[in-house]
Image (cartoon, rainbow, N blue to C red):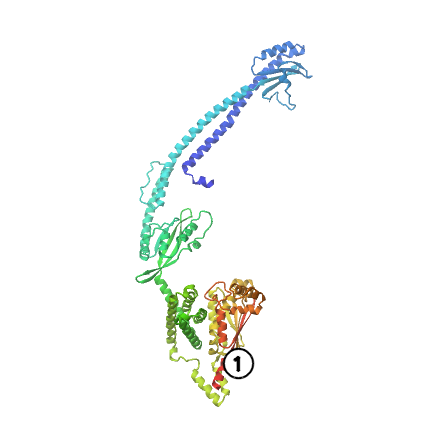
């Protein structure tokens, strides 16, 4: 109701106010005057009746004293000339009736005991009790009854008279209110109409002409000044829009684009002028559907009172687009800002359109240069490790290349595993952009249409090969690695020759010479510290690698054999093991997770132990996923041991991750780890405790034992 009244025009509010006042006056007149006129009439009748009764009582005193009823009858006979007198009766103080007429009416009257007045109204009659005194003593009571027909007639006449007067006042007041209201609001209506035209963008209308000098005239003059100021402001805005290098336009709650647009918009998007609505504009440069745009508009201008955050709502609209031009691809960015009206409500949305082609190219060049510096620095700091990585990656490239060449016999499981391993290896040595391209290729290979439409995957693979060749050639040229492909810390051929000579002359020197190839585990495995740091940061976590103080020394060649497996394990520790900051804090753990690494020799075997202090493996969740994937039956899941369940992590295409990320989720990581270890003649064992962490233990034949056996042979 309050909102309805607020929306009424001033004319109707004025009319309603005057009508309310007149109605209140009418109600007062109808309620007050008839009642008071009736009371006046009643008072007159009462006084008249009292006077008559007193006269009658005075006249019959002597008759009562001498028991002369004739005197009373004469008095009553004369009193009957009063048409309102209905009955009269003289009742002595002892209760006996002395005289009267129409006494049957009087007999029905019971005088109230608590009556304080000499008259009362009962059964539609006015009854008057007058004491008859003699010598100061009351000897009898004269009781008279009078008709009230005159009162009722007066009431009707009074009501009709007052009603007629009231109705006349009411009609006159309403007509007068309508007339005055129209006179007052007509100039205001002119101002409103002009304001609506301005709101619609019509600034060329004539100024208002109001001859009155009252408040309405002052309002019109002020409005004219405002229109003049708006025209100047609009002219300034057009000049500003013409000088901006950013495209700007506005759209309203109906999605209609305003006529005012910056000249830069037509330069950035030459055909943008043909679009009159935000629906058509966005559909012309993106794949957004009209339903989504309509949803955004309804949320931005939601009249239900529900709060919809602006940034979250416009996030459903495209923020970028690319347009094919003669000079290549043009990248465009869209930004949305609020424009409020005087009441603080959203009036329009401003759209800023920017050509970011050069900016993106500059950012990409800067990013590639930063990656290049990191790659070269990392390779220069550990040439042997880079060399081993390079050889391993080249082997994977050749293997994947052969798969694409012999496309008819492609093994999806193998190519997925190899791509996943290659992505992890390249990311380890700061080939970040290349790793992203490999991740995109993984998505293409995982798609259902890959087998029937391989062209997209092959084109992506060719691009990856070109990037790999360009980036590795750059590192080799900068560091001079192309001059000696067999370069380690000591030339391998010379070292092998020394070993052969030592075996022939003094075999005890073989062990000493082999030690030249050994380095601390923290140095050989140091590259994984950087990998863990990067992966944790991308996942919103924190983790560090810690090496046991009693680790045995190892060679780069020994561990490079299982580099792919180690990459997958460290990735698994970060993605599945280490918790987020909030989770670790709630569990009372240190904010940063720790991945501990141990490296030990026992006989001819090399043992690698990698342990995280994370959440551990949820073996029950693994079992449920195995049943859902058809790998196990419900019966197998119920009878399986803890070891059976935890070994499910090595099952192809089974992952504990709920969604695919750059780090994990494809179900090929741990399967690849076991395959690599088994191919090297080793074994892998996993231990885990929920809430405490997970430990991987890899046992491999020692490379030193193999080399010694080969030399001895």
Residue 543 appears in view: no
The residue lying furthest to the bottom in this view is 505
Q: In the drawing, does residue 310 fall left or right of residue 205?
A: right
Placement of 499 over or under 99, stated as above or below: below
Between 285 and 674, the residue placed more toward the observer is 674
Q: Nearer the viewer, residue 523 or 455?
A: 455
Question: Would residue 470 be found to the left or right of residue 698 on screen?
Answer: left
**Residue furthest left in the image:** 326
Residue at 45% x, 86% y is 498
Q: Is residue 707 above or below residue 233?
A: below
Name the secondary structure under disc 1: loop
User: Residue 266: where, in percent of width, then height?
Assistant: 31, 55
From the viewer's side, name the closer residue of 68 and 303: 303
Report the front residue among 165 and 305: 305
Identify the residue under disc 1. 604
**Could you tell me residue 592's position as x and y percent?**
52, 67
> Which of the 4 quarters of the picture holds residue 602?
bottom right
Q: State the residue lying farthest toward the right.
A: 94
Q: Position of residue 614 (x, y in %)?
A: 54, 67
How far across and down, in percent of the image, does residue 18 sit? 44, 33
Instruction: Note whether 493 is above or below 536 in the view shown.
Output: below
């Amino acid at each position: 109701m309050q909102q309805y009244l607020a929306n009424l025009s001033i004319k109707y509010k004025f009319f309603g106010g005057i009508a309310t006042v007149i109605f209140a006056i009418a109600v007062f007149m109808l309620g007050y005057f008839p009642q008071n006129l009736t009371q006046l009439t009643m008072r007159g009748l009462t006084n008249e009746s009292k006077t008559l009764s007193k006269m009658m009582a005075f006249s019959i005193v002597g008759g009562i004293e001498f028991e002369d009823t004739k005197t009373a009858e004469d008095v009553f006979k004369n009193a009957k000339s009063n048409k309102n007198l209905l009955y009269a009766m003289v009742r002595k103080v002892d209760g006996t009736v002395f005289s009267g007429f129409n006494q049957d009416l009087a007999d029905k009257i019971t005088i109230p005991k608590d009556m304080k007045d000499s008259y009362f109204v009962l059964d539609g009659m006015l009854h008057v009790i007058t004491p008859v005194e003699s010598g100061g003593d009351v000897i009898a009571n004269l009781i008279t009854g009078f008709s009230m027909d005159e009162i009722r007639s007066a009431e009707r006449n009074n009501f009709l008279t007052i009603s007629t007067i009231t109705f006349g006042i009411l009609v006159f007041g309403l007509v007068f209110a309508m007339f005055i209201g129209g006179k007052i609001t007509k100039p205001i209506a002119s101002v409103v109409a002009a304001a609506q035209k301005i709101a619609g963008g019509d600034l060329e209308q004539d100024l208002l002409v109001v001859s009155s000098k009252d408040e309405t005239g002052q309002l019109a003059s002020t409005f004219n000044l405002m229109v003049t100021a708006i025209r100047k402001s609009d002219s300034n805005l057009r000049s500003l829009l013409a000088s901006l290098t950013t495209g700007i336009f506005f759209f309203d709650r109906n999605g209609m684009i305003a006529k005012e647009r910056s000249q830069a918009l037509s330069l950035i998007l030459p055909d943008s002028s043909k679009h009159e609505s935000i629906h058509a504009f966005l559909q012309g440069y993106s794949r957004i559907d009209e339903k989504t745009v309509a949803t955004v508009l309804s949320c931005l201008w939601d009249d239900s009172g529900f709060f919809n955050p602006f940034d979250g709502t416009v996030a459903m609209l495209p923020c970028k687009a690319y347009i094919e031009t003669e000079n290549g691809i043009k990248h465009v960015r869209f930004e949305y800002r609020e424009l409020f009206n005087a009441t603080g409500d959203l009036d329009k949305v401003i759209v800023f359109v920017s050509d970011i082609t050069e900016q993106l190219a500059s950012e990409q060049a800067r990013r590639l240069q930063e990656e290049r510096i990191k790659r070269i620095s990392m390779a220069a700091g550990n040439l042997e490790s880079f060399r081993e990585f390079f050889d391993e990656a080249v082997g994977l490239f050749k293997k994947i290349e052969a798969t694409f060449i012999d496309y008819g016999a492609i093994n999806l499981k193998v190519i997925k595993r190899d791509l996943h391993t290659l992505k992890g290896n390249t990311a380890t040595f700061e080939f970040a952009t290349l790793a992203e391209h490999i991740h995109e290729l993984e998505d293409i290979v995982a798609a259902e249409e890959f087998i029937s439409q391989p062209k997209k995957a092959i084109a992506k693979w060719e691009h990856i090969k070109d990037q790999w060749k360009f980036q590795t050639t750059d590192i080799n040229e900068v560091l001079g690695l192309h001059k000696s492909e067999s370069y380690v810390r000591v030339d391998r051929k010379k070292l092998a020759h020394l070993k052969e000579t030592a075996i022939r002359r003094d075999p005890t020197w073989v062990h000493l010479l082999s030690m030249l190839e050994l380095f601390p585990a923290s140095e050989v495995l140091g590259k994984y510290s950087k990998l863990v740091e990067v992966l944790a940061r991308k996942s919103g976590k924190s983790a560090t690698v810690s090496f046991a103080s009693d680790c045995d020394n190892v060679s780069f060649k020994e561990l490079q054999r299982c580099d792919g497996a180690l990459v997958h394990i460290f990735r698994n520790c970060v993605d599945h093991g280490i918790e987020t900051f909030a989770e670790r804090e709630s569990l009372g753990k240190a904010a940063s997770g720790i991945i501990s690494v141990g490296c030990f020799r026992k006989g001819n075997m090399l043992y690698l132990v990698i342990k995280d202090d994370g959440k551990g493996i949820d073996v029950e969740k693994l079992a449920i996923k195995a049943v859902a994937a058809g790998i196990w039956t419900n019966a197998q899941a119920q009878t399986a041991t803890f070891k059976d369940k935890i070994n499910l992590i090595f099952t192809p295409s089974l992952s504990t991750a709920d969604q695919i990320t750059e780090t994990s989720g494809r179900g090929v990581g741990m399967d690849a780890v076991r395959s690599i270890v088994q191919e090297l003649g080793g074994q892998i064992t996993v231990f885990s405790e929920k809430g405490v962490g997970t430990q991987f233990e890899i046992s491999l034949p020692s490379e030193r034992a193999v080399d010694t056996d080969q030399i001895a042979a």
